[in-house]
Amino acid sequence: MDKIGINGGKALKGRVKISGAKNAALPIMAATLLASGKFKIHNVPDLRDVKTMAHLLRIIGAQVEFANNSLTIDTSKCNFYEAPYELVKTMRASIYVLAPLLARFLEAKVSLPGGCALGSRPVDLHLKGLEKLGAKIELEKGYIVANAKKLTGASINFDISSVGATGNILMAAVLAQGRTVIGNASHEPEITALAQFLVTMGADIEGIETGRLTVHGVNHLKPVEYTVVPDRIETGTYLMAAAITGGEVELTDTDPKILTSLVSKLRECGVLIEEGDSTLYCKAPNQIKPVSITTAPYPGFPTDLQAQWMTLMCVANGSSMITDTIFVDRFTHVAELRRLGAEIKRNKNSAVVTGTENLNGAPVMSTDLRASASLILAGLRAQGRTDVLRVYHIDRGYEKIEEKLKLLGADIWREEGGL
Ligand code: EPZ
């Protein structure tokens, strides 16, 4: 298993291009199953998760080509309505094929996603929503077995604003007979991108970008060409990499409008940020001020930036509190940051971080995608050498991270082999 080595202490400088959003590309790829024909999707990040979804679509019978960040997906010969455990266990987002298969073929068999480093992640809202649309759902030998004579519109109100459940119910509702209203729907930019993609295919959706979606089912959807939105989590990670190293960077091909919560918090820390239409310029202050955050559904502070924020607060001049209300156990990075000399006190779904002058390099272990990003940020700041082990986690969600950081002047490399 590869590891990433970093000699810290270099201020990042320069310009880097942001990739397309993983969490938009995955549901959009699954949504191609809703129509028969050839799709062209651009600005798709070259990530392990994208390759896993492409593999899943091929198993279902689609022809998929991926080159130069563009996908060609032909769904005209799909004939196998199953997502096997072998794939779902490597990527929970495989659950996104459940509703499109059910909506188009009226049957689907998808492995129930298993345990996760982020804590318990049930899919009850997905299943309850599909049942409300008329599906019959059974759990058999670890699989969700769904079928329906037809899907009929209904009113669905989520107890929790769930990204995944909103995505799945939206994809079922666009081909269901009649009207569906989804209350307390997620309006993360990635869900907005999915809804806009469905509208270009011919779907009838009102209330996009709000917490209340109204869908009028149609009989038929068509294949289209589409460009995926920028990745706001990758953008946020690079902004914090610049801030923690005392650097000055410009990010291009991004969208400042979908990252307002992070930008305002960084400004509170004393970071200078200038926004262009598709660029963000960032200059770090001499000292980072401590600022507390609480994660929340969009437009609140993203839970996928919580670990990176914690790393930044590890070098702030004072104490701050970090609370995660979405994944209450999302703190596996704490023990690893402590190995680098961080002072963090955990209490339930919060942690109090007391900033320290300097972190010291050491080997650390990745446990999940965003935790590994937080360890790379720590390694960029720490004195001496840091080895981030098990980087297969980072390859799931960051395109060519060490090459991009090298472009910004980081002393970083990848090594094969390691724990
Ligand atoms: C999406 O996961 C993202 N994944 C996650 O990003 C992100 O952390 C999360 O949304 C929150 O923003 C993708 O888009 C592929 P949820 P998802 O359903 O859809 C509970 C990354 O790093 N819940 O919004 O699984 C759930 O347990 C990944 O890129 C239920 O109780 O998240 C959680 O506490 C990690 N029942 C909360 O809702 C359900 O049926 C929010 O989860 C569904 C969810």
Image: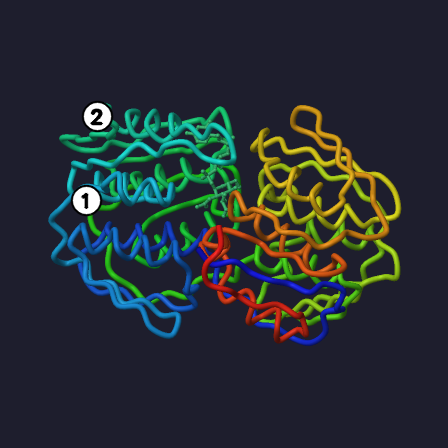
Q: What element carries label 2?
A: loop
At a point 80% along the width and 63% down the height, the residue shown is 284
Q: Depth-wise, is mark 2 or mark 1 nearer the camera? A: 2
Residue with the most extreme front position: 418
Which of the two residues, 263 or 238, is positioned nearer the viewer here?
Answer: 238
Which of the two residues, 157 or 42, is positioned nearer the viewer here?
Answer: 42
- Residue 67 is left or right of residue 230, and the answer is left
Which of the two residues, 283 or 204, is positioned nearer the viewer here?
Answer: 283
Which of the two residues, 98 or 391, is positioned nearer the viewer here?
Answer: 391
Residue type at tag 2: Lys
Q: Can residue 123 be seen in this view?
A: yes
Numbered circle sitting on residue 328: none
Q: Mark 1 points at which residue?
A: 104
Q: In x, y percent, where is residue 244?
A: 75, 58
At a point 38% along the width and 41% down the height, the residue shown is 92
* Other-residue count near label 2 (Cα within 10 Å), few / some / many at <14 / 14–19 / ≥20: few
Q: In x, y percent, where is residue 127?
A: 32, 28
Q: In which quarter of the image is the N terminus?
A: bottom left
The residues bearing labels 2 and 1 have C-alpha atoms spaced at a distance of 24 Å
Residue type at tag 1: Arg
Q: Name the residue under label 2.
A: 141
51 vs 400: above or below: above
Quadrant housing residue 54: bottom left
- Residue 96 is left or right of residue 350, and the answer is left
2 or 1: tag closer to the N-terminus:
1
* Other-residue count near label 1 (Cα within 10 Å), few / some / many at <14 / 14–19 / ≥20: many
Q: In x, y percent, where is residue 19?
A: 51, 66
Q: In x, y percent, where is residue 49?
A: 39, 54
